[in-house]
């Protein structure tokens, strides 16, 4: 694989190669202000026929979205499974407008022993923990199947870091992961990197909204193909400085 290439605004561009992926990913970082969005879905109910199947939600009991900056959206993935007989899901509702469900083309029939995926989107309007009861209505033995989704709204920084890169030229690329670390002024080095995108990023743009004033960061990207093979880190953009709070 070839290694990805990245840069930060007003800083030099570095390039090298990673793994067996071809192409370069020059990454550009700059400061921008925050934006947001929202959404919700709902539906109705139908009585189950005799001998209906069973509908289960995966993961069981709770689907966590995690920390999401107020005014932005975070997502988590789940699935609906039909056990011994096929089940037709006709509607899905959320009792909290900050949580919405997408990815299901209703009504959807799930064959016995199979599953269909769905996505929960959490768009907090205030800081603090939040939860929602998601109700899936179907013709299963239990017509209403419920799942709890949780998330925490976090305060927005006055700044965010805008990243962009050139798409990989390798075949079958399905998306990119973005990694971040704290930059240490004393050692002039980056700490341990952590993935900051909650789902695979399918575009060549990413905005890091969860930054702290007065902190410096390092960024790197990787490419992921349709076989879920991930390249190594691109060249690292280091010492991306976030202004201190006024």
Image (tube, helix red, strand yellow):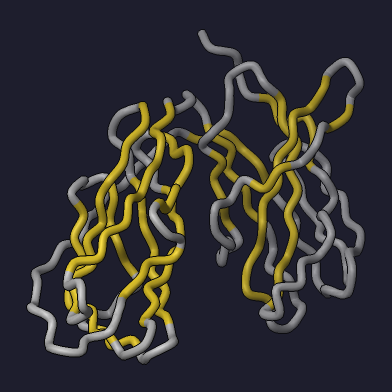
52 w.r.t. 177: above or below: below
Horizontal side of 137 relative to 67 (left or right) equals: left
Residue 34 image offset from top left, x and y in percent: 42, 35
Horizontal side of 177 relative to 91 (left or right) equals: right
**Foreground of the two, 136 or 35:** 136
**Foreground of the two, 173 or 120:** 120
Picture quadrant of residue 147: bottom left
Q: Which residue is at the far top?
A: 246
**Foreground of the two, 210 or 236:** 210
194 w.r.t. 160: above or below: below
Residue 242 image offset from top left, x and y in percent: 63, 24
Say which residue appears at 75% left-offset and 36% top-offset: 218
Horizontal side of 94 relative to 191 (left or right) equals: left
Say which residue appears at 36% left-offset and 54% top-offset: 121
Horizontal side of 3 relative to 81 (left or right) equals: right
Q: Quadrant of the N terminus?
A: bottom right
Residue 201 image offset from top left, x and y in percent: 57, 61
**How many marks do you count on the picture?**
0
Say which residue appears at 82% left-offset and 22% top-offset: 184
Residue 189 image offset from top left, x and y in percent: 88, 29
Picture quadrant of residue 129: top left
49 w.r.t. 121: above or below: below
Picture quadrant of residue 170: bottom right
Q: Which residue is at the far front?
A: 51
């Amino acid at each position: 694989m070839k290694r990805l290439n990245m840069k930060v605004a007003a800083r030099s561009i570095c390039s090298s190669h990673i793994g067996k992926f071809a192409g370069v990913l020059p990454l550009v970082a700059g400061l921008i202000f925050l934006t947001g969005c929202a959404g919700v879905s709902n539906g109705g109910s139908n009585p189950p026929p005799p001998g209906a199947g069973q509908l289960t939600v995966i993961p069981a009991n709770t689907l966590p979205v995690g920390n999401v900056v107020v005014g932005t959206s975070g997502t988590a993935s789940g699935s609906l499974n039909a056990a011994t007989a096929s089940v037709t899901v006709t509607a899905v509702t959320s009792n909290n407008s900050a949580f919405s469900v997408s990815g299901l083309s209703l009504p959807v029939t799930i064959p016995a022993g199979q599953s269909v995926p769905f996505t929960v989107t959490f768009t907090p309007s205030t800081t603090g923990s939040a939860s929602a009861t998601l109700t899936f209505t179907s013709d299963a033995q239990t017509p209403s199947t419920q799942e709890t989704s949780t998330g925490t709204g976090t305060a927005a920084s006055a700044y965010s870091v805008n990243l962009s890169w050139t798409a990989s030229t390798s075949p079958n690329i399905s998306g990119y992961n973005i990694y971040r670390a704290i930059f240490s002024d004393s050692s002039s080095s980056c700490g341990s990197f952590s993935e900051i995108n909650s789902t695979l990023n399918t575009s060549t743009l990413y905005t890091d909204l969860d930054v702290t004033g007065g902190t410096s960061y390092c960024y790197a990207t990787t490419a992921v193909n349709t076989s879920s093979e991930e390249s190594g880190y691109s060249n690292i953009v280091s010492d991306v400085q976030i202004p201190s709070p006024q």
